[in-house]
Amino acid sequence: MADLSLTFGGDLSLGPTGDLAVADGTLLTQQRVLRRLLTNPTGYIWQLPYGAGLAQFVGRPGAPAAIRAVARSQLLQEAAVASSPAPSISANAENDGTVTLSILYTDAAAQETITLSFSV
């Protein structure tokens, strides 16, 4: 089922026909994963446990293990991510203090393996 295309922190955009862009399939799953990982816990008052709140780790040294654990627990709760095989998550500390998060998960609907990487 398609939904409006909205990357976390971004804005709605126009589709090729001039109407609002939509996302479906693996793109929609990727948007859901990013929203879950970047939303602060208790940020949705109607679903308090939703969200990993990865922004809380910005500026905290030695946080790769904690980031990996929080991301894993939230991904296992996301319906769009297949539980088997379990998502594979690596968090590596860089010299400048950022942590690069690499996630390998299977889209539950499409049964495709997706790779997602970003820095915290």
Image (cartoon, helix red, strand yellow):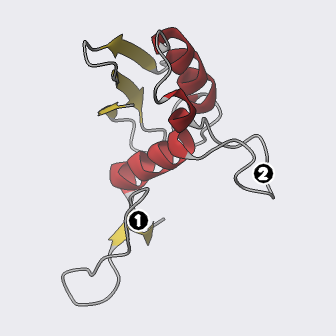
Asked whether residue 30 appears in the rendered view, the answer is: yes
Label 2: state its secondary structure. loop
- In this rendered view, identify the residue nearer to me: 27 or 8: 8
- In this rendered view, identify the residue nearer to me: 31 or 55: 55
The quadrant where residue 114 appears: top left
Mark 1 or mark 2, which is nearer the start of the sequence? 1
Which residue occupies 39% across, 15% down? 91
The quadrant where residue 70 appears: top right
Query: From this viewpoint, which residue is outermost toward the left?
Result: 16
- In this rendered view, identify the residue nearer to me: 13 or 85: 13
Mark 2 touching mark 1, by CB under 8 A? no
Which residue occupies 48% across, 65% down? 1
Residue 28 tag number: none
The quadrant where residue 25 appears: bottom left
Residue 47 tag number: 2
Label 1: state its secondary structure. loop
Q: Residue 71: give x, y in percent of width and height.
A: 54, 26
The residue carrying mark 1 is 6
Amino acid type of the residue that numbered disc 1 sits on in the rendered structure: Leu
Query: Does 53 sit left or right of 15 as displayed?
Result: right
Per the model, the C-alpha gap separating discs 2 and 1 is 20 Å
Which residue occupies 56% across, 44% down? 36
Q: Residue 6: give x, y in percent of width and height.
A: 41, 65
Numbered circles on residues, count: 2
Q: Is residue 58 above or below residue 38?
A: above
Asked whether residue 114 appears in the rendered view, the answer is: no
Q: Residues within 10 Å of mark 2 (few under 14, many from 20)?
A: few
Q: Residue 67: give x, y in percent of width and height.
A: 52, 20
Q: Residue 97: give x, y in percent of width and height.
A: 34, 18
Amino acid type of the residue that numbered disc 2 sits on in the rendered structure: Gln
Query: Does 56 sit left or right of 9 as displayed?
Result: right
Q: Is residue 100 above or below residue 12?
A: above
